[in-house]
Image (spheres, grey):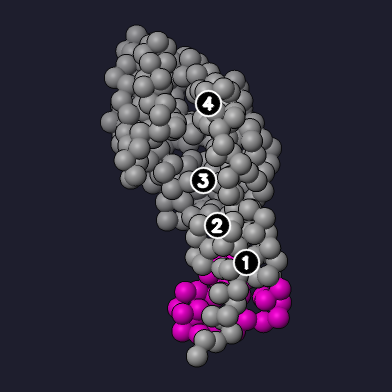
Amino acid sequence: MAGPIDAMLRAGGEAIAATSPTAMLDARVLLKWAAGVGDAQLLSGAATVTAAARRRYQAAIARRRRGEPLAYITGRKEFYGRDFSVAPGIFVPRPETELLVTTTLEAAAAIRDSAGTSIVELGTGCGAVAITLALARPAWRITATDASAAARRTARINAAAHAAAVTIAAADWLHGVAGRHTAIVANPPYIADNHPCIHGDGIRHEPRAALTAGADGMDDLAQIIAAAPKHLTAAGALIVEHGATQAAAVRKLMNAAGLARAATRRDLSGRDRVTIGFANETV
């Protein structure tokens, strides 16, 4: 016989079925969060759901039914195996962005800068990429920038929570970034202004400025790529995430900016996702 927890999960899943394609999974995540229990307790039926937890769960289901991302409701998002604080108004990190981290780790390790390895991440949001890099390579100098004060506050909270040595600073892409660096890393907005996906589940609640970038989604990518060579060391690399159909255009922009050996990597779904280009030795 189904117990009260099963009934709560079923009712929650049914309530958000029209909003979410993963309704039952979402309901489970929200109930674990509301009750403060893990999978084992939930599956065994040993979890105790207090009246307060039931109210939190019902309020969370209502928010999810309105299309809010799970990360905004729970205040957490997993990235590279770690939990990060996320708040409304801040871009939610995606699993495919983990490729940006692995590409940066591999590229920067191969570049020999006499003054040491210096990485700048542009538009850090909650800080997930920069913090992950800092934890993987503590000897590297990692700077995370964002034009949003709210994003910088959240990134500082996450850096402190993970004891990551990351410098967090205000900058509008490369405006405000000084010096030359081993790698510049960015996951800028790359969705076209009128793309229908921006009205979809979850994403419509995220800040539009962190999602869209002009008629073809290339405005911010073009700005970053054009400015990057002046901020890279002689063998430095620019590494950017982009949309699945934008790789050729990104490589073309990199070549035009004087970046060499532009190459694109695919994410786990087989989609073009990250492109890297290297500074000429004469830059």
Instruction: Say whether disc 1 or disc 4 marks the residue closer to the N-terminus.
Output: 1
Marks 1/2: CA distance? Answer: 10 Å
Residue beneath disc 2: 20
Q: Dot 2 lies on which element?
A: loop
Q: Is any atom of residue 119 visible in this view?
A: no
Question: How far across and how far down the image is residue 145, in percent?
Answer: 57, 33
The residue sitting at 55% across, 87% down in the picture is 3
Instruction: Say whether disc 3 or disc 1 marks the residue closer to the N-terminus.
Output: 1
Residue beneath disc 4: 217
Pick the front one: 166 or 260: 260
| Circle nearer the viewer, 2 or 4 | 2
Pick the front one: 256 or 81: 256
Q: Dot 4 lies on which element?
A: loop
Quadrant containing the C terminus in the rendered view: top left
Pick the front one: 165 or 106: 106
Question: How far across and how far down the image is residue 15, in percent?
Answer: 62, 66
Pointer 1 with pointer 4, Cβ within 8 A: no
The residue sitting at 49% across, 80% down in the picture is 41
Disc 3 crowd rating (10 Å Cα; few below 14, some 14-19, many 20+) is many
Region rendered in magenta: 27-55
The residue sitting at 47% across, 74% down in the picture is 39
The residue sitting at 59% across, 53% down in the picture is 69
| Circle nearer the viewer, 3 or 1 | 1
Any mark on residue 93, and which?
Answer: 3
Type of amino acid under label 1 = Ala
Residue beneath disc 1: 15
User: Which picture quadrant has residue 146?
Assistant: top right
* Magenta-colored segment: predominant secondary structure: helix
**Picture layout, residue 231 above or below residue 64:** above
Type of amino acid under label 4 = Gly
